Amino acid sequence: MTKKFTKAILRLSNKENHRDTYDLEFDLIESSFLPKWIDRYLLAKQRQDRISEPWAFYNLNNDWSESATVDFLNYHINACNSLMPGLFMQTLTDINDQDTLNYIHSVFELHHGKLDEWQNNPLFKENSTLREHLSFVNQTVHRCESLGKTKKIRIVYFDLPKTEKFNNDDYKLFTNEIKFGGLYTLYADVGKNLESLATDNDDHHHDFVPNLHYSVDCVVKFDDNDGLENQKLYNEFLDKNWNYFDHKGYVKNDPRLTTGAIQIAQLNYINQQQILNDLQNYNYIQDLIVY
């Protein structure tokens, strides 16, 4: 008999003291998509995949100042260049320099390839640590772009194969609304989706890739937003640039152009400010537990 999962715990800790733990407890939200997400979670657990970025806290503590974020990005850019000279032609000096961030991200797109294509790239076979440094570059670009915006914790498993695609029924569950303590699906493709193109003014990207694949990757958000302003922005961008999407084979009301995410679970809490105050003391994701 298949077990029914109804709860989730995100166990956090202080990276200086693994015994100092803090649990965020969630109720899973029943939907036609939930069993698919649980399947990916169970596969990650069976494969013993590790959480790839246990420090992926955004705008919740003081660990990631502007200077620390830029330094971390440039460290991994330089590490990539030491393994493959000339891979990146520039580093970042100003965290608000979106054009340079777009360029840096385009280098990641070009060499990582879509989804699991990296597995067949001889670059990563010759340089076993190159993919890890390149992945850190990618995620730190997004950290730069997120600084001072939505408070969130991302839970990602980079090594889990991205094989599963959303279907039309899944897209009907997508929302641009953000609820405090909501646990949402996370963009699992490589490229730029409609949301990113509408906000990044990116002339460097290699390809538009909508929200096609799903994984166990997810994000907890600690803000409230009805999403209407963002939905309007995305719709206006789509209308203004329709010829681009038309030439790529998309049609009006194509489900693949759906924006947002599926809410997987909702945090149990009494006081939002108390949660935010507590989170300032934690900076490491110890585990995601679904039961």
Image (cartoon, helix red, strand yellow):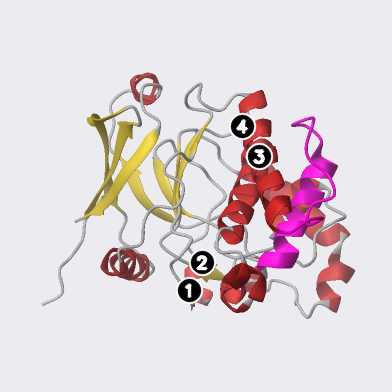
**Label for residue 75?**
3
- The residue nearer to you, when weighing 54 against 209, is 54
As for residue 30 lying within the magenta part, the answer is no
- The residue nearer to you, when weighing 229 against 282, is 282
Pointer 4 local density, CA inside 10 Å: few below 14, some 14–19, many at least 20: few
Residue position marked by numbered label 2 in the rendering: 172
Marks 2/1 in contact by CB < 8 Å: the verdict is yes
Q: CA distance from mark 2 to mark 3?
A: 41 Å
The answer to whether 172 is drawn above or below residue 119 in the figure is: above
Q: Residue at x 68, y 32 (%)?
A: 70
**Label for residue 180?**
none
Q: CA distance from mark 3 to mark 1?
A: 43 Å
The image quadrant that residue 203 belongs to is bottom right
Q: Amino acid at mark 2?
A: Lys
Q: CA distance from mark 1 to mark 4?
A: 30 Å
User: Secondary structure under badge 4?
Assistant: loop
User: Secondary structure under badge 2?
Assistant: loop
Q: Which residues are magenta?
A: 84-112
Q: Seen in the image, is 156 located left or right of residue 43?
A: right
Residue position marked by numbered label 4 in the rendering: 149
Q: CA distance from mark 2 to mark 4?
A: 27 Å
Q: CA distance from mark 4 to mark 3?
A: 24 Å
Residue mark closest to the camera, 1 vs 4: 4
- The residue nearer to you, when weighing 266 against 83, is 83
Q: Seen in the image, is 276 located left or right of residue 241?
A: left
Image coordinates for residue 273, horizontal then vertical, percent? 39, 20
Residue mark closest to the camera, 4 vs 3: 3
Q: Seen in the image, is 24 located left or right of residue 161?
A: left
Residue position marked by numbered label 1 in the rendering: 169
Q: Amino acid at mark 3?
A: Tyr
Using the rendered image of the protein, determine whether residue 237 is visible from the camera's viewpoint.
Answer: yes
The image quadrant that residue 12 belongs to is top left
